[in-house]
Amino acid sequence: MSALRNILLRREAGIAVMIVLFCLAVGTQKPQFLTLDSLRIILLLTPLILIGAMGQMLVVVARHVDLSIGSMLGFSAMVTGMMFKFHPEIWWPIGFLVSIGTGALLGLINGLLVTLFRLPAIIVTLGTLNLYRGLTYIVSNAKQIDRQYVPSALKAMSQTSPIFGIPWIIFISFGVALLTYIFVMHTRVGRQIFALGSNPVAAPLRGVAVTRVTLLVFSISGALSGLAGILYASRWGFVNPSNTGSGFEFQVIAAVVIGGVSINGGVGTVLGTILGVLLLGCVAAALPLLGIPGTTQSAIYGAVILIALLIDRTVRQQGIKSLTRARA
Amino acid sequence: MSAIQTPAARELPPARPRWQVIVIRPETMTLVLLILALFGASLLSPYFLDVGYILRSFTLSAEFAIVALVLTMVIIAGEIDLSPAANMALSACLFAFAQQAGVPMPLAIAIGLFAGLVMGAINGFMVIRLQIPSIIVTIGTLTLYRGLAQVIAGDKSIRVPDWFIGINTVLIAGIPLTVLIFIVMSVILGVVLSMTIFGRQIYQIGTNEVAARHAGIRSQRIKMSLFLLMGLVSAVAGLMTASRLGSVRYDLGLGGELQMVLMAMLGGTYIFGGRGTILGTFLAAWLLVIVSTGMTVANVLPAVQLVVLGVLLIVSIIATNFIYSRTQR
């Protein structure tokens, strides 16, 4: 009984209930929303956000925030796209290494600025958000990488499937989520991220190498943005210097905050983040079906971030209350 | 982290010579950079020696500069607001939408300004009453306000009446009206910040809010008034931009938060609060205008300008932090 109670009291249960209620509500209006086909649409909307959200989750748990992920996505995708365009002789899976490596490098720069100069991550990444976007224009000469240059084998990853008609990119994104789960739950460094985020002053006293963990967290966020970058090329078949990845950071931050990752650091789960991403995916899939114009999407993301912040605050205060009650 | 003082720092250090106190300040750095930028720009094009040309170029950034003045006060109080550019867009869209729907002009302007005030109040409520960090709140409201502007205006641009257009071309004593507003605002806010009890209390809140509250400062009320002022001034800036451009689109002022934060940071405002001056932001605004106009004159691609602005932002925080860590006040 108490095990069931524990499950129901978990934060993730709340998000799952919200997803179900939302889907049922939309389903009463448009029954076709409750079919396997729309599940496929929802899942196809989410892989990039899911991958970005895993990196962002680690950054937020470490009590930072990374606003530059959209630009890192764009830059890595552009570098990879240019490799495809100008060096078509290179075996295309090398593109994954290039994209992830580029992203990790950009993320490392963020991390270095934050740790070396003790700057707030929000300002640093606001700067690099623009910096990396500008660099994307410069390296690409403001030209788009068109469909014909993206290898068809790469594009096929978003369409063909190894099993059950589920495309490769969905497997990749859930694979990343699984690896992140193992990383945060079963490795020493993963647990240190939580220690650092819950108490940055105490963490170094307990032997956490703060600089190294922070650098690692930002590099992972960059590397995952890079992975999302090449998958963007796979999913959409082009890379555009201004569109690719623009506004990505807001979707990802929305997903992470909905998923119950506390902006005060130290709290967050992979499962919660996945559910947060899925909820966003459901909303994004339901809008066109309900005939709501796409221009409202940004406003809805904004509202969702604020609502999630309110929920986060309420949950936190109740947690503090129950802790004090338990001690009394 | 910066609040932790080593025991050695608590003993009074020997007083620094007066010239050092004056020279080693971020504002001095900004002034030197400004002179250098003017010098470099005049080599680039003789137009930069013409005050009229500089004033005309300033009208392009005057709206952001005005908001940056208030943002400086918000940052000194230890908070931040990333939503003003989105606030400008939404209040301008509401105003333009209302006047297009036949609402009389004065009422439409009032609607725009009131909307800005409400947006500031929402930010303030979430930050002060609900105790959610301002950075994340204003990221949320940034998305929300910009999104609502898009909902209202769609992808179309809304025209404003002809007589409303061109506030930037109105000259008073040879100075464009928007620039004059900026200068007057700078003087007023500079006096408020440095010479009134209210202004000094802002510094105390930013330095140590808990201590300030124990000293009897109504920190919540002061911060709330700053957020309200921020909202109102953003709305004014939004209307000024609408008047300059002659039409309103949802992407009005897009990316302006970078420029505003950059002006405050270049002017030596300390990102962790408690330090900074209006004079610094005032100088930084001019510096930024000359740099960006200079780049345009030199045919630098907009993309490269984006890179330069991003680098400037990071370099200016590093420099400011460095100066403050060297000179304990």
Image (spheres, coloured by chain):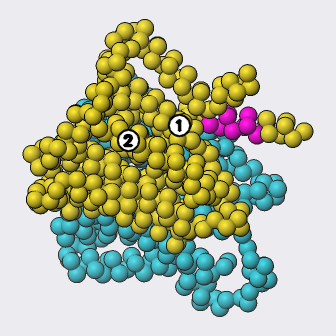
Tell me the distance, in whole angstroms, between the alpha carbons under discs 2 and 1.
Answer: 13 Å
Nearer the observer, A245 or B200: A245
Q: Colour of chain A?
A: yellow
Q: Horizontal placement of A4 versus B111: left or right?
A: right
Q: Judging from the image, what secondary structure is the residue with disc 2 in?
A: helix
Q: Which residues are magenta?
A: A311-321
Q: Residue at x 9, y 45 (%)?
A: A148
Query: Where in the figure is residue B323, as x and y percent of width and height?
Result: 55, 79
Chain at numbered mark 2: A
| Residue A204 falls within the magenta-colored stretch | no
Residue at screen point 44% across, 56% down? A220
Quadrant of the drawing holding the N terminus of chain B: bottom right
Letter of the chain that mark 1 sits on in the rendering: A
Specify the chain shown as cyan: B
- Would you say the magenta stretch is mainly helix, strand or loop? helix
Give the mark, 2 or 1, whose residue is nearer the N terminus: 2
Which numbered circle lies on residue A173? 2
Residue pointed to by mark 1? A271
Q: Is residue A197 visible?
A: no
